[in-house]
Image (tube, coloured by chain):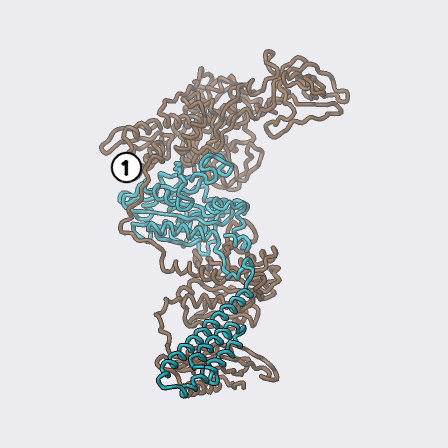
Chain colours: A brown, B cyan
Amino acid sequence: MRVSYDWLKTMVQVPDDPAELVREFVRTGTEVEAVDTVGESFDRVVTAQVVTKTAHPDSDHLWVCQVDVGRFNLGEDGEPAPLQIVCGAQNFEAGDHIVTALVGAKLPGGVEIKKGKLRGQVSAGMNCSERELGLSSDHAGIWILPEDAPVGVPLAEYLGTADTVLDCEITPNRPDCLSMIGIAREVGAIYDRDITVDLPSIKAETGTPAPEALSVRVDDPELCSRYVARIVRGVQVGPSPDWLVRRLAALNIRSHNNIVDVTNYVMMLTGQPLHAFDLATFAERGGRRSVVVRAAVEGERFTTLDGVERELAAGMGLITDGERPVALAGVMGGMDSEIEDHTVDVLVESACFNAGRTSHTSRDLSLISDASIRFERQVDETGCADVADLACALIEEVAAGAVAPDRVDVYPSPRAIEPVSLRLARVHALTGADIEPAFIERALTRLGCTVEVADEGFLVTPPSFRPDLPREIDLIEEVLRLWGMDRVEATLPAARNHIGGLTREQHQVRRIGGILRACGLSEATSFSFAAPDDLSRLHMGDEGLGAPVVLMNPLVAEQTEMRRSLLPGLLRSVAYNEAHGTPNILLYEVGTLFHGREHASLPREVRSVAGVLSGVAAEDTWNQKHKPLRFFDAKGVVEELLSQLRVEKVQMRPAEGDAYAFLQPGRAAEVLSGGSVLGWVGEVHPDALASLDISLPVAAFELNLEQLLRAARGQERYQVFSSFPSVDVDVAIVVGEEVSYQDLVRRIESAGGRLLAGVRLFDVYRDPVRVGPGKKSMAFSLTYQATDHTLTGEEVERAHEKLVAKVLRAVKGEVRA
Amino acid sequence: MSLIEDLEQLEVRARERIASAATQDKLEEARVALLGRKGELTGLMRMMGKIAPEERPQVGRRANEVRAAVESLLGERIDEMRREAQKHRLAAEAIDVTLPGVRPLIGHQHLISQIIEEIEDVFCGIGYTVESGPQVETSYNNFTALNAPMDHPSRSARDTFYVVDNAPGTVDHPEAHAHGESDLLLRTQTSGVQIRTMLSQRPPIYMVAPGRVFRPDTADASHLPQFNQVEGLVVDHGITFGDLKGTLDHFVRAMFGEDRRTRYRPHFFPFTEPSCEIDVSCGVCHGEGCSFCKHSGWIEILGAGMVDPNVLVNCGIDPEEYSGFAFGAGVERIAALRYDLPDLRALMTGDMRFLAQF
């Protein structure tokens, strides 16, 4: 809402410095987005006089003029001299006082005046019409000023339009502030001052009374709670007087003609949107015309006055003349019934349309108007009649119309406003401030409430233009914002009987991040959205991942559903980093996945933790060389994570089959704990990488966070170290390739007995000749130790022989000499 | 020459020989030659039998003194040599200490997570719990229970991502929807967690709920279709607007610095009343006005208000018995303000160079 300071001044006393009012507005809840000085848009536009006017030598309609612009005169030689301007207007003569835009002027609408040549003749400015200055729709020719107009005065100064305009952001609960009167009332409440609004009244009513010439029927009472119509006959449609043009211009409303301008002016003054129809365009039956307010039927078509034919949906509000639509109720009038230069009789509509219905219509048609903005925030229906009268009085004044007696007023159920009890104790209990009762009474009264003293405080009847005040809490808010939120003393709640802090699980989730960072991975956050082919293009199966959760209104094609795995997002980050030449790509993400359910509304939301490792851990330095990150680097991270979280019975098994087609076969493992699958670790299949233009190998893992948290155990009790010496014995066991490390180690551990204190694999060796084809030698260092005595050589030998024999039998292996 | 004199001379010779031994080998030679089984001192001692018995104690004492003196000289000389050798070794091991060290590879926490944890910790410090809720929410929890009117513009598909409902009408509180909308949406605010918490816990409630929220804004330098909010809610006996101020003053100072001031501007939100927006004094100009704060001296940082009685009633809490306040802040906005981020999209790329800065 743009607020003209000049206009505001006519209604209430305001501070001389607008900045002071701005501070008070901000303090009491009216955000001011900008403070403009109007007249700036007339920068380098001055009053002028035509000195000579000669026909252009090479044109039959252009004139070459010498124009005196007073102190702005500037000849070709830099000395003061009248400007040469080529002009195409036909409505002026030498000696006329006119308005000229100098070189460098920017006119409303963005036109910038430059020096140039028109058909060979220099032109150093432009003679302006009122339309070009945004002051009127009149484009009959250039603007001819009265003979007594000065020459060489900035136009803003000449017009007296230097005004300050506050661009206020009005919150949706304050329809009343979408009007100058509402703003004036707000100022009155802030400064405890009276407001005065001088409104003209109708001077004479003549002709057939409106109710005899017009009937109004409201078929949809929910849509329209009140419809007031008045008729003004014999109007002379034409330009508006300067004062009206200027008031509207300050509020960024372009002048159309005197009738439309009056409706806009009254709307800006009172907040009640009005519409003026050309009555002659309404169907006539037996000398009477009618207005029917009804809901549109699905598919009905209507051309609004912006010239767009729109297809309507059922339920949108329509004003019709009984036969065809003439306006989209509360949003915009129709092309066919708008006020034209030849309009004679005007129907003035002052109605109240339903807020929700207007909002839907406006939203569904993407059509927002000054009227729809006001109706959707709720207009004060009790004021419809007075506002209609005001509009008629102004049309009478500026367009010489004859107002028909009486109104047509359809208002079946006048709104009753219930008084609200405002308890002083409640004000104190909720604000925590001691606000004096006298202040409360004064502030609410200034806002237009009727305030009576009652038992526990006041009985307050809010004014009809404040639909946002039906409850006690609403009144408390008004009192607090005017009294001043900044004045309330800051306190802290006692929080008795409440304990806070993170839960164990929340701590664990934080730890998981900490462990992964300690492993060198940095945290990424990807979009929760996914493309429909995110999984399929990686050849990732969706078994166990539920159905996709699909957006109804996605923004872009790559984000039409919700992600079911963290891997695609992390791989995008790998591709991004690789494309930017980053050599070390180590990322993890902890995030939510969305597993849709076929026959249920809400999806399952599952948290997941995933990581990607690609390139090298770091670039080589003078004293440190790094190997490319591969499977075992990712696996090591997973092992460290599981170990730190004390996950028990960890097991890895080759990840095979279609479900793992996105991983390189033979370099992928399922991660299990106690038989349940926590996730996987592996190198991403080259085909999957190629689909994302990734060239380097990527080792990755993804674990179900919920399962991981369930599998995590607490820290075990301290275990005393043996104080007796240990003995290390190395053994290399040759086994077939089909025997995994995991199998072998489990055999060793179970065969080891009490004395085996440690197993460490230190070499894996393959050689078709020395080891044999299809075989491998795995060399272990086994540590023997007792907790209660020093082992003798014999004891160790016995235990070791027993262990080796058992293991060899179990895995069909042999000891490599 | 008496044995005593021989011993005296031996000591003098030993002193010279030990002092002149240049290497540990020479020193060992000297030790063997002096104190060894075939050494000089041993030789002299063998002659003890040839002297008078009454002189023996004196000579014996003297011999022991000489032995001790020689041993001590040897020891000192060895120490000296070791020190010398170590000195040389250490000198040889000297390095350019300005060369880069071997740094352990530690990953970085995403700055948004850092800020979220920081906020959680500020509130845990004053006795709050951390709550969470689903990101796919019902329109009832996201809007209706929070007192947003059915025709509120924020419900439109222009401002809210709607989700295809696989089982229409089966959520708690199904609602009628315009074309293109449904009962399921991507939460546009974390406020739904307020509702879930009030329904599942009884007051006193002191909680924050950080989390992802979604709005259909095309990604650009200052917008992301997905971002993070931290919502806070307190419901207890006797909670006042003053409590809201004290709590949020604490939060703002903890996040931005003790010297920062706050400003409470009345505002409107459907789910709180009275409502306000909270500004923090500009950290660049300290309130004087600069380009960073668009010359206002203030930077908007939070929305807050007293919980609207309708919201309490929707959650089965008696507004006459309990009152409360709620607040919300955008995490990316805090990040952008604190670290002067020129483009929010950098938060989503996983760019290692970006992540490593925080």
Quarter of the rendering occupied by the N terminus of chain B: bottom left
* Residue A519 in view (yes/no): yes
For label 1, the SS is: helix
Residue beneath disc 1:
A428
Give the farthest residue toward the top: A148
Which one is nearer the viewer's eye here, A555 or A17? A17
Q: Pointer 1: residues within 10 angstroms few (<14), some, or many (20+)?
A: some
Q: Count every numbered label the image shows and give the total.
A: 1
Which quadrant would residue A436 be assigned to in this image?
A: top left
Identify the residue at the far front of this view: B1
Q: Chain of mark 1?
A: A
Indicate the position of residue A392 as horizontal and vertical percent values: 46, 21
Q: Amino acid at mark 1?
A: His
Identity of the residue furthest to the left in this view: A455
Q: x and y percent of residue B148 in the render?
A: 40, 43
User: Hey, which quadrant is residue A746 in on the image?
Assistant: bottom left
